[in-house]
Amino acid sequence: MTAEPDAELIEEGRKLFAGDWKFVWASPSIETLPPMAGMEVAFAGRSNVGKSSLINALTGRNALARTSHTPGRTQELIFFDGPDSARLRLVDMPGYGYASAPKTQVASWTRLIHQFLLGRATLARVYVLIDARHGIKDVDQDVLKTLDKSAVSYQVVLTKADQVKRAELEKSIIATTAALAKHPAAFPEILVTSSRSGAGMPELRAAMVRLLHERAR
């Protein structure tokens, strides 16, 4: 299920992400996390699902987050601050699942992801990116179960929607919605995006603005 945010949230989101976003921190381990500040939202997903491309599209910067066609290039938790760092921070997480790296290293990243999801008080929401062409896989289910156990709300974002025909995209949305019904912590609305075309970016920005408003109450 998808929903349309109101025009005021869309405009506030546009202004928030039109500011100067920058890299501020990289954490290879749970011991090296930055001090907690403001509200954090994290982007999780399988290797090569398009997390870094999504962050670049959100912030309107081509190279803020490093992108690669090689799965497993992001090996740390990467933090980005906007013009008002006391309000919102973005976290690019290592891709889980297949990665072109030694198994011990992949296991270390996976452990880091799960530890971060379970123990970060400033983490307001995790956006779980799912490739619209492939849908939810078993390795995604493992992360969803971890999120169900934690106190963190999460929302699914379908990526690469421009690479799927409309009928197939509708099927993917229906199948993903059905799968999420089994996960109590999942936010019921699915966001559909394309980093290449910019589709869904205003709605995703607006979703973060809504979170900021909710946290401020």
Image: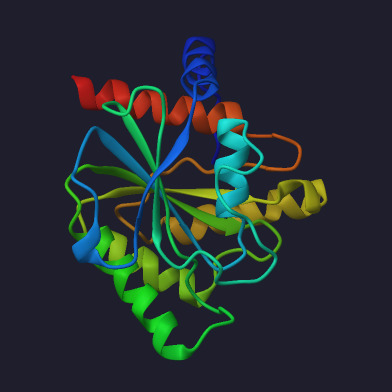
Q: Residue at x 37, y 64 (%)?
A: 144
Q: How many marks?
A: 0
Residue 170: image x %, image y %? 70, 48
Return the x and y of residue 160 as percentages of the image width and height: 70, 51
Q: Residue furthest top?
A: 8
Q: Quadrant of the C terminus?
A: top left
Give the x, y percent position of residue 116: 26, 60
- In the image, is residue 31 above or below residue 124? below
**Residue lying at 53% horizontally and 83% vertically, measured from the top left:** 101
Does any portion of residue 149 appear in the rendered image? no
Q: Nearer the viewer, residue 142 or 96?
A: 96
Quadrant in the picture for residue 64: top right
The quarter of the picture where the N terminus appears is top right
Q: Nearer the viewer, residue 154 or 17?
A: 17
Q: Is residue 79 left or right of residue 158?
A: left
Looking at the picture, the colour scheme in use is rainbow
Comparing 45 with 190, the one in front is 45
* 175 sits left or right of 163 in the view: left
Picture coordinates of residue 115 (x, y %)?
A: 24, 67
Residue 76 vs 192, above or below: the answer is below
- x 52%, y 33%: residue: 204
Residue at image coords 56%, 32% = 59
Question: Residue 76, relative to residue 63: is it above or below?
Answer: below
